[in-house]
Amino acid sequence: MLRSKIAGVGYYVPERVVTNDELSQIMDTTDEWIQERTGIQTRHYGKKHEETTSSMAAIAAKIACERAKIAPEEVDFIVFATLSPDYYFPGCGVLLQRELGITSREAGALDIRNQCSGFLYALSVADQFVKTGMYKNVLVVGAEMHSMGLDFSDRGRNVSVIFGDGAGAVIVQATDNQKQGILTTKLHSDGTYAEKLAFINPGAHGGYHFKKMGEERDFGYPPADTYGEIFITPKMIADGDYYPNMEGPFVFKMAVQKFPEVIMEALEDVGLQPSDINMLIPHQANLRISQFVQRKLGLSDDQVWNNIQRFGNTTAASVPIALCEAWEAGKIKEGDLVCLAAFGSGFTWASALIRW
Ligand code: COA
C-alpha cells in the first residue's frame, strides 16, 4: 500500500501588522489583557479589497508546489479549508484553482468547513485519496481572511483581538517508503455545543435550533408564510447580529481536554509515546492552551512550535503556517515525528502523526 507524504509546504501572511495597542484605540481592550489571556502580541490583516482568502491561498500554494518540485498544473485535486470564504458559494477551492490558472485540467476541488480543525480534516481527506492511488498530487490549503468579518466594536472584543489573516498550504504526494509519511489521522466531532463558537448569521436556520434548545431569540424573521429574507433580516443588521460569537471560557475548558486526548489516541494507534514527538504543531488557539497541552504531555519547549504571539489565531491556516515556519527554521528534519493537533468550533478536533 502506498503512503502519503508531505512533499512541500508554503505559507503567506499579509504585510500589514496590527498591534494590540492599535486595537486598543478602536475598542475597549489593552495590550496587557490580550497578552496575559492569549499570548498574542500582533496579528496580520490582509489588504482590504485587494487580498482575499483565495488570493492568499494561491501565494502559499505556489510556494508549496515549488518545494514539492511540481508545477501547479500537476495538482490532481484541491482540498480547501476555511471559515472565511470569499463567497457563500461557490467555495474557495474553485477560486484557488482559477487563481492558480489551472482550470484547464478540470481537476476536482473540495471545500472543508471544519473551522480550526479544518486543515487536519483536509489533510486526512488528501491522505485517503493518495494512499489508495487515486491521486498523485493533492493540494491541501487552510486560509482565512478574518479581518473582513470581525466586530471591531467593544461588543466583539473577546473574539476580534484573537484572530488574524493568513494562508498555509501543503502538497500531499504518494511514497513507497513505508517508513515515511502520514502514519495516522484521528478526526472527531460533537455537535452538542455547535453554538458556543459560531458564526450564525447570515444562514438558513430560521431560528430552528434555538427554538429546539428552548432559547427565545428573536432574529426578526418575517412570518413563516411569506417568501424571502431568509439568510439575513433587517433586525439582524440593526442588531449587528452577523459576527462570530464565542463563549471563551467554555471553549477553553473543552480545548484543554480534547487536545491531549486526540494526540494520545494517535500515538497509541501507532505504538508511540509523547516523548517520541520531535515537533508538536498545535492549532494556535491560545498560547495558554498550547502551554497546558505541552505540560500535560511532558514536552519541552523545543518539541512545540508556537507562533500565535505574532500571527494570532488564523483558524484553518494556523497549523499549516506553523508547520511551514517550523520546517523553514530547520526544526523539522527527515525522520522526525511530527504531530499536528487541533480543536475548534463544532466542536471538532483532530490529530495527525507524520514521519517526515
Ligand atoms: N479586552 C479586555 N477585556 C476583555 C476582552 C478584551 N479583548 N474580552 C473580554 N474581556 C473581559 C470580559 O468582558 C470579562 O469582563 P467581566 O469580568 O467584567 O465580565 C473579562 O474580560 C473576562 O472574560 P472571560 O471571557 O471570562 O475571559 P477569559 O479569561 O476566559 O479569556 C479568552 C477570554 C477568549 C481569551 C479565553 O476564554 C479563550 O482563549 N478561550 C478559548 C478561545 C479559543 O481558543 N478560541 C478559538 C477556537 S479554538
Image: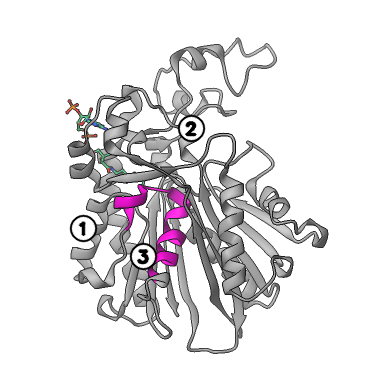
Which range is magenta? 307-326
Three-letter amino acid code at disc 3?
Answer: Ile
Disc 3 CB within 8 Å of nearest ligand 1 atom: no
Is 4 positioned to the left or the right of 134 in the image? left
- Amino acid type shown at disc 2: Gly
Within the displayed image, which quadrant is ligand 1 positioned in?
Answer: top left
Residue 333 sits above or below residue 168 on the image: below
Report the residue at 59% width, 75% height from top: 68
Magenta residues: mostly which secondary structure? helix
Left or right, residue 259 beside residue 9: left
Looking at the picture, tell me which residue is in the foreground, 79 or 129. Answer: 79
Nearer to me, 10 or 81: 10
Q: Nearer the viewer, mark 1 or mark 2?
A: 2
Spatial CA span between label 2 and label 3 = 26 Å
Tell me whether the residue at label 2 lies in contact with that at label 3, contact meaning CB atoms closer than 8 angstroms. no
230 sits left or right of 269 in the view: right
Residue 108, compared with residue 4, is above or below; it is: above
Q: Residue 190, percent across and down? A: 42, 49
Q: Is mark 2 on a helix, strand or loop?
A: helix
Quarter of the figure that contains the N terminus: bottom right
Which residue appears farthest toward the right when viewing the image? 104
Q: Name the residue under label 3.
A: 281
Nearer-N-terminus badge (2/3):
2
Looking at marks 1 and 2 on the same chain, the residue that comes earlier in the sequence is marked by 2
Q: In this view, does 316 lie above or below 225?
A: below
The residue under label 2 is: 149
- Which residue is located at x 22 percent, y 37 percent? 31
Disc 1 residue type (three-letter): Phe
Q: Which of 19/302 is in front?
A: 19
The CA span between labels 1 and 2 is: 29 Å
